[in-house]
């Protein structure tokens, strides 16, 4: 019998478990350990609440979770309840699928002023992550600045713009819905330090901005390159840029009825955030591109008055004591997923925060091929019974998958009309519902 521990129950974790089942059949026991009492990581806490069709992928993970040889071990923190070297002594393979839940640091003066949030905190707040549920983002001002030109910046701008009716059918948590409904936002500026041809936004997500009830996107035609240059882009990128061109062509008469303008400010690098005890303005430097398409400051600066700044500049994997880490790239130091003998990483913990949810599937299958290759001829270890004994001795209250199903049932029962669920946002409430 082989014993595999996977740390993290998001997409990378479940695809890896699926791959291990396929590879080893009945000859494997897989424990998926998560620090939270609820599974699915990014699907529950990262994917936007109004993107329910994307969240449906958790049905596939549930099939894996319900099979005999896979176990969910929730409410167990690696590094606190159990050390990584203890797991290594218990399991034939330990695979870190911890994702990248921490913000990449915005390294400019004033970035720690109240009113500056990273996307992990803001997204975690509207998605009911227990770490961020108590945040109260200052939504009383008229202008919000969003930093970054990726899909998370789009998620954030869209969520800030939607009306209560547009959240129908979503699982945005009640506390966020209330605050967003009473926000007084009139302008959202999305700062891109490079140009329209360098965005990391995908067409579907950009297209959604054109269909909002009370908001409309704005792009300055002067920022767009000559249209003939679009032919050089790969097809997805060309579609995205076509959306930007459509936004630039929206007539002023159409804007008059809209309360919120979502402004794309390209070639705009934030260099400082200022304010007296809280955010009052962002200082932006006009940029241009060098011959390697990197942004360089032109020396021309301007200020954007605002009361909330949300930095959406990418994520990093949290480090774990004793595990080699690559600081510059915010992920574990690894060679094709191998960190140390018997210790592996997969998904965003392996390659950094890029790609779609589906990218984690081949990642999971590849890492299990590596595990199988390394395991050849090795001795089996004690696995589950060993972990159970350790956690029991330490008084850790494990949440199982059947406990989670009870939590889920309770969340469905307390949903507001039309919503799929109302999430519990506190760990103690989750545990109580699962008990
Ligand atoms: P991302 O795609 O890496 O985009 C980060 C953005 O931040 C880039 O535009 C980058 O600009 C900018 N940036 C980085 N450092 C900066 C700085 N110091 N100052 C100003 N700008 C800076 O990251 P993300 O938006 O967090 O998305 C992470 C992953 O999740 C991506 O693969 C994304 O597609 C995926 N995602 C998908 C969806 C969806 O499919 N619906 C939704 C959300 C997220 P440069 O290019 O100049 O570095």
Image: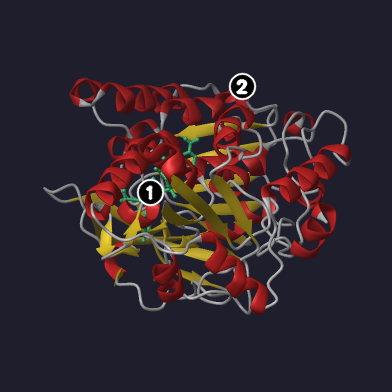
Colour mapping: secondary structure
- Residue nearer the viewer, 118 or 113: 118
The Cα atoms of the two marked residues, 2 and 1, are separated by 46 Å
Residue at x-position 28% and y-position 67%: 328
- Residue nearer the viewer, 378 or 131: 378
Rendering quarter of residue 63: top right
Which of label 2 and label 1 is nearer to you?
1
Q: Is residue 38 visible?
A: yes
The extreme left residue here reads 291
| Residue topped by disc 1 | 347
Residue 9 place in picture, x, y as percent:
54, 50
- Residue nearer the viewer, 377 or 293: 377
| Residue topped by disc 2 | 253
Q: Is residue 250 left or right of residue 276?
A: left
Secondary structure beneath dot 2 equals helix
- Residue nearer the viewer, 15 or 162: 15
- Disc 1 C-beta below 8 A from ligand 1: no
Rendering quarter of residue 145: bottom right
Nearer-N-terminus badge (2/1):
2
Secondary structure beneath dot 1 equals loop
């Amino acid at each position: 019998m082989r014993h595999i521990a996977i740390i993290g129950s998001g997409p990378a974790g479940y695809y890896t478990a699926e791959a291990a089942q396929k590879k080893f059949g009945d000859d494997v026991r897989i424990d998926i350990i998560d620090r939270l009492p609820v599974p699915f990581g990014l699907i529950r806490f990262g994917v936007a609440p109004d993107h329910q069709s994307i969240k449906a992928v958790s049905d596939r993970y549930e099939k894996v979770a319900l099979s005999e040889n896979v176990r969910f071990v929730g409410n167990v923190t690696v590094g606190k309840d159990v050390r990584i070297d203890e797991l290594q002594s218990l399991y034939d393979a330990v695979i870190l699928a911890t994702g990248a839940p921490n913000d990449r640091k915005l390294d400019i003066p004033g970035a720690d002023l109240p009113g500056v949030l990273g996307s992990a905190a803001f997204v975690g707040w509207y998605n009911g992550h227990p770490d961020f549920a108590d945040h109260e983002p200052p939504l009383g001002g008229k202008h919000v600045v969003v930093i970054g030109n990726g899909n998370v910046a789009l998620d954030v701008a869209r969520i800030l713009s939607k009306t209560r009716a547009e959240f129908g059918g979503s699982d945005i948590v009640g506390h966020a819905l209330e605050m967003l409904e009473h926000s007084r936002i009139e302008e959202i500026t999305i700062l891109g330090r490079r140009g329209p041809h360098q965005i990391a936004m995908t067409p579907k997500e950009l297209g959604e901005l054109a269909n909002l009830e009370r908001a409309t996107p704005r792009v300055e035609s002067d920022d767009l390159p000559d249209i003939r240059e679009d032919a050089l882009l790969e097809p997805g990128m060309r579609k995205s840029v076509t959306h930007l061109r459509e936004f630039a062509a929206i007539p002023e008469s159409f804007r008059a009825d809209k309360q919120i303008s979502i402004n794309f400010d390209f070639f705009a690098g934030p260099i400082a955030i200022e304010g007296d005890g809280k955010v009052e303005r962002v200082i932006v430097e006009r940029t241009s591109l060098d011959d390697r398409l990197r942004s360089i400051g032109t020396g021309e600066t301007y200020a954007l008055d605002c009361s909330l700044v949300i930095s959406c500049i990418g994520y990093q994997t949290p480090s774990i004591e004793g595990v080699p880490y690559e600081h510059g790239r915010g992920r574990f130091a690894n060679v094709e997923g191998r960190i140390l003998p018997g210790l592996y990483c997969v998904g965003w913990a392996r390659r950094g925060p890029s790609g779609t949810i589906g990218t984690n599937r081949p990642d999971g299958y590849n890492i299990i091929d590596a595990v199988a290759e390394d395991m050849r001829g090795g001795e089996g270890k004690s696995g589950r019974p060993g972990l159970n004994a350790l956690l029991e001795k330490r008084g850790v209250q494990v949440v199982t998958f059947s406990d989670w199903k009870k939590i889920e049932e309770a969340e469905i029962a307390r949903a507001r009309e039309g919503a799929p669920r109302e999430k519990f946002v506190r760990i103690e409430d989750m545990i109580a519902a699962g008990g």
